[in-house]
Image (spheres, rainbow, N blue to C red):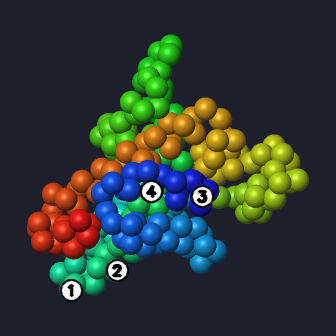
Amino acid sequence: MLIPIHEDMTREALCDCVSLRALEVMIAANCKQDSLRGQIGHDEYHFDNNAIDDGHRYISEQRGLVTSSLLSSEVFSAWSAFGRLTHTAQDFYAHTNYISMWLNQYKGTPPVPSEIDPVQKSLVESPSLHSGKIYIPMDVFYFVPFLRKLSLALLPRDSHGRMNLDSPKQGSNFAYARAAAVKRTQYEFEILEKILTPEMFSKFTER
């Protein structure tokens, strides 16, 4: 998703959960994942190129860093790790076909976006789950406004350019991707609340 959208979603999900100082560090780390350095050679940061297992593994690694950082009293490192974790978790819904699979379960009128289940096990573990592949150079041209139409005409259906739900411009499914990403961010926070000791969780939230 676009950087401003990542920021808005993270703020919405966590503004009542952690201190403002913690939240700003988390948001900065989240958004940094979309820097040029974070885009090249790091499919696991964004669930790109079918890096489904690698993306889940990266989330688990960052969750582990939150814990180890708090054990070492490095709270800023814990906040940064959680920020990186949330970026990847949020991109799962924008870069995979999870949203379309969830909607395909319903015939006729689907539920409203706020009712989406972001961690439906049968979909998360489905062999049909996949993410957009990045085709060079057409997927690069996709980000050039005056070349986008040409790029989309030439890109395969499984490309990042044609699959992504990175902004409202991608259609009505974006609302579901955004709602799922906010819920997933809150879900990841709740996991930490369960696995951290009360003292560690207090340090993490500064509440």
Question: What number of labels is visible?
Answer: 4
Does the rendering let one see residue 189?
A: yes
Q: Quadrant of the C terminus?
A: bottom left
Residue 10 image label: 4
Q: Residue at x 33, y 43 (%)?
A: 119
Give the vertical position of 68 relative to 46 (above or below).
below
Report x, y in % for residue 160: 64, 52
Q: Residues within 10 Å of mark 1 (few under 14, many from 20)?
A: few
Q: Nearer the viewer, residue 12 or 119?
A: 12
Q: Which mark is residue 72?
A: 1
Of circles 1 and 3, the one toward us is 3
Disc 3 element: helix
Structural distance between the alpha carbons of marks 2 and 1: 11 Å
Looking at the rendered image, the disc whose residue lies closer to the viewer, 2 or 1, is 2
Tell which of 106 and 206 is nearer to you: 206
Based on the displayed image, in which of its 4 quarters is residue 89 positioned? bottom left
Q: Report the residue marked by disc 2.
A: 76
At label 4, the amino acid type is: Thr
Please report contact status of discs 2 and 3: CB closer than 8 Å, yes or no. Answer: no
| Left or right: 168, with 125 as reference point | right
Residue 55 lies, in percent from the top left, at: 42, 61
Q: Identify which amino acid the numbered label 3 is placed on.
A: Pro
Disc 1 vs disc 3: Cβ atoms closer than 8 Å?
no
At 60% across and 73% down in the image, what residue appears? 35
| Mark in front: 4 vs 1 | 4
Q: CA distance from mark 2 to mark 3?
A: 22 Å
Find the distance from the CA under tag 4 to the CA under tag 3. 10 Å
Q: CA distance from mark 4 to mark 1?
A: 25 Å
If you read the primary sequence from the N terminus, does the residue marked by circle 4 or circle 3 appear first? 3
Closer to the N terminus: mark 1 or mark 3? 3
